[in-house]
Image (cartoon, grey):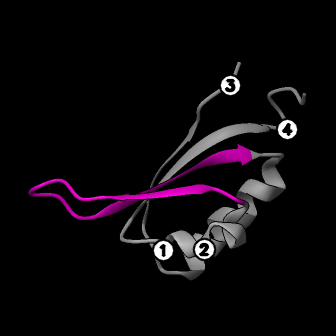
């Protein structure tokens, strides 16, 4: 297991809008869940294991290219 500088681990990335579950493989195998709460815009959570910062940057860049506003990135199992 890498230390904190490598930042491997499980992440939850939240974006505004909808990401189709079929994009999971292209987004590093992340589990994709879209939610809509009354009075709020739709958002999608992507949760999965990321091996390193390069992989995380790749996922974030892919979401950027899809023109999805980034709402949050959370490292779920950090030290």
Q: Earlier in the sequence, mark 3 or mark 2?
A: 2
Judge left or right: residue 39 versus residue 4.
left
Label drawn at residue 6? 4
Secondary structure under the numbered disc 4 in the rendered image: loop
Q: Residues within 10 Å of mark 2 (few under 14, many from 20)?
A: few
Does 27 appear above or below 30? below
- The residue labelled by disc 3 is 78
Q: Are marks 3 and 1 in contact (CB under 8 Å)?
A: no
- The residue labelled by disc 1 is 20
Cα separation, mark 3 vs mark 2, equals 26 Å
What percent of the width, then of the height, locates residue 24? 63, 66
Q: Are marks 3 and 2 in contact (CB under 8 Å)?
A: no
Q: Quadrant of the C terminus?
A: top right
Secondary structure under the numbered disc 1 in the rendered image: loop
Residue 31 in magenta stretch: yes
Q: Which residues are magenta?
A: 29-49
What percent of the width, then of the height, locates residue 54? 83, 57
- The residue labelled by disc 2 is 23
Which of discs 3 and 2 lies nearer the camera? The answer is 2
The answer to which image quadrant residue 34 occupies is bottom left
């Amino acid at each position: 297991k890498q230390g904190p500088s490598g930042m491997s681990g499980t992440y939850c990335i939240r974006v505004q809008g909808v990401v189709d579950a079929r994009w999971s493989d292209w987004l590093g195998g992340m589990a994709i869940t879209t939610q809509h709460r009354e009075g709020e815009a739709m958002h999608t959570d992507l949760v999965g294991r990321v091996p390193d910062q390069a992989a995380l940057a790749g996922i974030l860049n892919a979401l950027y290219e899809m023109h999805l506003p980034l709402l949050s990135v959370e490292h779920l199992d950090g030290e």
